[in-house]
Amino acid sequence: MRLKLLFVYLYLSISFNSFSQEKTINAIVINGAKKTNTTYLKRIIESKVNQTLDSTRLNSDTNTLIKLAAISHATYKVEKTFAKNKFNLIFNIEENFTIIPDVNFWTNNKSDIAYKIGIYDYNFLGKNIGFGGFYQNNGYNTYAINFRAPHLFSNKFGLAINHQNWKSEEPLYFNEGSANYLYNNISYEVLGLYQLNSKNNFELGINSFNEKYNYLDGITSNEIPQKLNLNKFLFKFVYNYSNLKYHYQFLDGFKSQFYGQLVKSDGNQKDFLIAWNDFFYFKRVGERGNWSNRIRMGLSTNNKTPFAPFSLDNNVNIRGVGIIVDRGTGSIVLNSEYRYALLEKNWFCLQGNAFIDGGSWRNPGGKLADFTNHKNIKLFSGVGLRFIHKRIYNAVLRIDYGHSLMGDGTNGIVFGVGQYF
């Protein structure tokens, strides 16, 4: 009996002693924040004062900070205080410059000079709020204004509001050929944002928009409409999963983005569903290399219409193929590239890349077998350069040259801001 009591005493002593030895957070300090609101940063991380120090939670918090547009890099350390088992948690952050001008010039289809000017602050009020807009003239006046606050109401709930009046010349494809239309989309969108945890977040909302198509040139017949004016509602659902690790311009890990939309029309167009998923996989290779991959798979209601939602465009999915060269009601696209830091300084990186882009489409009103039809398969490869400012958010100027591997001689140069994916 005495032996049993001795064992119980020893067990309770060890348990109590272990409990009393737990390291707890005495204070949280954030160094390096100049514009960013430190109270906001403390609110969105999981670690709190008087909690037990947890290395898994600390690593997750560090990654949460790095994901913010305002922060290019973050590290943490713990410092012992005079109080027993009390530690100060210190985050050291490097801020991005987040007020970004948007200035572009190019020639349009009429060989006139087109331009776009805008400005965005991705850390508005120091609270990771994206706010800004642009004006574009490509022969037609276009403008947009956007507001996105992921943590407006709490560390989990936010709001996004967008308005756009877009005009552009769009090719539509028919059995007999194609025709060019002036496309005008005036939209108002409200989205609720919810962050379940550091890896999972959701968006749910509605977009009310008016679409107008006015015939410009190309083929025409009695069956082809000269004008369309449609009021529509779009119900949107987005689910993001991200398990990426960030180190400046380098990425490592897996990410998935699902988009689902139900579009309802008050005109002679049928209601339709559209959904697609982007799967991303990134792998660090040595100190300078990054293998990057994206697979996009999407389907929509299979209406036989020239207004099919998936477009084949070198600015979106296959570099070098041309600007909106085809449309479909289904899409499977693979982008794979190897990025390598040719030159890297404290604030600048010159990155080279070699890539392969491939994909296939389902024709409007067609069958799933269209994906294997060689006429619908595109395969391009090429090389490119990235000019990266490591202290300015999304400051990546890219240029890529893509050439068809299908023997048709198609090729092209693609410019853009930000990584292709």
Image: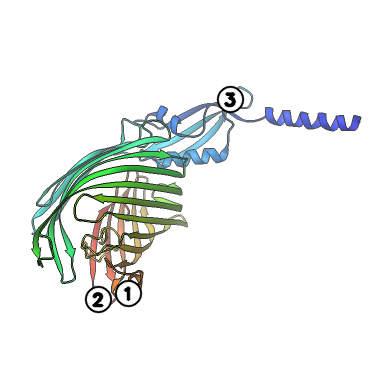
Which of the 4 image quarters holds residue 128?
Answer: top left
Using a 10 Å C-alpha cutoff, classify the residue at mark 3 as few (fewer than 14 neighbours), some (14 to 19) or many (20 or more). few
Residue 19 screen position, x and y as percent: 68, 30
SS assignment at label 2? loop
SS assignment at label 1? loop
308 relative position to 10: left or right = left
Vertical side of 415 occupied by 21: above or below? above
Residue 307 screen position, x and y as percent: 21, 59
Kind of residue sitting beneath label 2: Asp
| Alpha carbons under labels 3 and 1: distance apart | 69 Å
Vertical side of 3 occupied by 254: above or below? below
Residue 81 screen position, x and y as percent: 58, 25
Which of the 4 image quarters holds residue 132?
Answer: top left
Residue nearest the observer in this picture, 117 or 137 = 137
SS assignment at label 3? loop
> Can residue 51 be seen from the camera position used here?
yes
Question: Which comes sooner in the sequence, label 1 or label 2?
Answer: 1
Residue nearest the observer in this picture, 205 or 342 = 205
> Can residue 392 be seen from the camera position used here?
no
Q: Nearer the viewer, mark 3 or mark 1?
A: 1
Residue 197 screen position, x and y as percent: 47, 40
Vertical side of 51 occupied by 170: above or below? below
CB within 8 Å, label 1 to label 2 = no
Kind of residue sitting beneath label 3: Thr
Q: Which residue is mark 3?
A: 81
Residue at image coords 50%, 36% = 76
| Alpha carbons under labels 2 and 3: distance apart | 70 Å
| Alpha carbons under labels 1 and 2: distance apart | 16 Å
Q: Which residue is mark 1?
A: 373
Q: Residue furthest bottom?
A: 407
Q: Which residue is mark 2?
A: 408
